[in-house]
Amino acid sequence: MMTTEDIADALELTGKLMELHGENPFKIKSINSAAYKLSKTRLDLSNPTVEALTQLEGIGKSLAEKIIEFTTTGTTKELQDLIAKTPAGVIDMLGIKGLGPKKVKQLWEELELESVTDLLYACHENRLLELKGFGEKTQNAIIQNIEFKIKNTGWFHYAYAEKIGQPIIDAIKEQTDLVSFTGAMYRKCEVIEEIDILVGDESIDLDDFVSETIPLNFIQVNPNLFYRKLVETSSTKEHLEGIDFKALPTKKYDSEESVYSGLQIQYCEPELREGLFELEKAKQHQLPKLVEFSDLKGILHNHSTYSDGMNTLEEMAVYCKQLGYQYLGICDHSQTAVYADGLKVETVLLQQQEIEKLNKQLFPFKIFKGIESDILGNGNLDYEEEILKTFDFIVASVHANLKMDEEKANARLIKAIENPYTTILGHPTGRLLLGRPGYPINHKKIIDACAANKVVIELNAHPYRLDIDWRWIPYCLEKGVMISINKLSVHKKIIIQVLNLQ
């Protein structure tokens, strides 16, 4: 069944192709708006009706019927007609960052380019400079974005791969309990190339299990070897060498823990089997407990309908209280983020009045007054001091002017970190996994600055961000920098050792 996210993506593609072919701009705007709204919500689409869908803001009868067509057929006639009259390579060009439908239309019609390869070749021949609205800077950016896309072709977000792989695991479990993800999937790496699955039964026929998007790799072993093989296939080469895996006695093991017991070292969770700092700690039996959802007492960096969120402040607070959390930190976009309905000063004050009212109603549950304040190009936050001091906490984040060299990025972030009102540095590099690399920073300098100014660093746990990169968390801990786990699409891998922070 298609999810709201799937349908939002399909509607977004529909809108782009309509614009590419010069169709009605009002209809395009309506479709794009619906795609955005759907991307921000999660609806039960098991039995959608026109009546229910039209209750959503921006969804009329025509769009509701399109959504129902997607849920019943997986596509729409309109989208298929648009795809049929568009070369596949031109559709691929729409996926290049920085190239909207208007620019792709120019490249297709005026330069007769019909593939990403054609486009890259044309860039290297400086042919884009002939087009109105294309300059050398734009051409160079396109080259960089194509090269980034090519480099990441064949990689998938862990969260997406899990949706593909888990039903397969569940189906195999009907025949044997000895089945598990392994490899990078079992370590819950940020991005993966294939879904590795270990099956402890050599007699099961796995030919019927296929994936049209992500390669599947099945490893079948004798049940007596299952747990030994699970540790072996889920570890990096460096981890196996570091724990002297070849010296492990050959016998049947009944768990992964017993495998590590046989090696006479502390059990390493799958997420830790990287061959990094875990080896020394495991040998000394000093590995920390990994953070679980149950360890979290509240959540910060949340957006409400005051800016670009999909739920009201009250809905969010009541739901968090029902989940057993002790607090909610509301952190809507600030006034510079006009694209996300960022809060003007008067709206900030209105929201804070509502927070005070809700805190009385929901006591002892607490809503903290926060804001995600944009870090401007000069490193300043985007409110005056008289407003900044009204917040309980401030997440300072970069959202614009991302094309910085390392020196400029460091100076900009450090100035924001040194601002006395900054509580948390949000998603420090601005990266989007498989989408953009993020601006270059000297992580040690930024972490050192946070340590000196007692600023917390955000671990933005959205599966497309995972920023700060988990590999820098040990250095944060070494320097006494606290980590704020936000966006709560968390998996263990990225939050190792955070429980050491008290």
Image (tube, rainbow, N blue to C red):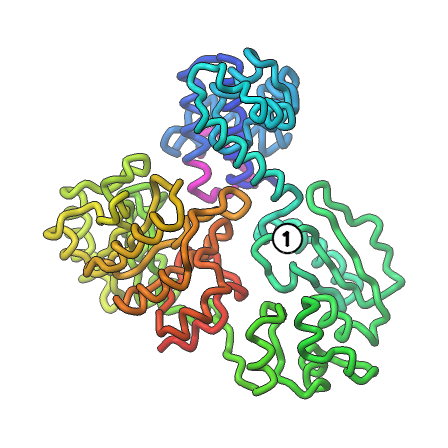
According to the picture, the residue beneath numbered tag 1 turns out to be 192
- Would residue 336 be visible to someone looking at this image? yes
Q: Residue 494 location in percent, x, y?
A: 50, 63
Position of residue 3 relative to residue 239, above or below, is above
> Can residue 177 be spotted in the picture?
no
Q: Up-down: is 325 above or below 121?
A: below
- Amino acid of disc 1: Ile
Residue 43 colored in magenta in the image: yes
Locate the N terminus by quadrant: top right
Q: Residue at x 68, y 88 (%)?
A: 264
Q: Position of residue 418 (x, y in %)?
A: 23, 60
Q: Which residues are magenta?
A: 37-52
Quadrant position of residue 305: top left
Question: Helix, strand or loop at disc 1?
Answer: strand
* Magenta region includes residue 421: no
The part of the image, by quadrant, that contains residue 360 is: bottom left
Tell me the residue at 48%/19% (across/down): 129
**Residue 201: percent from left, percent from top:** 84, 66
The quarter of the picture where the C terminus appears is: bottom left
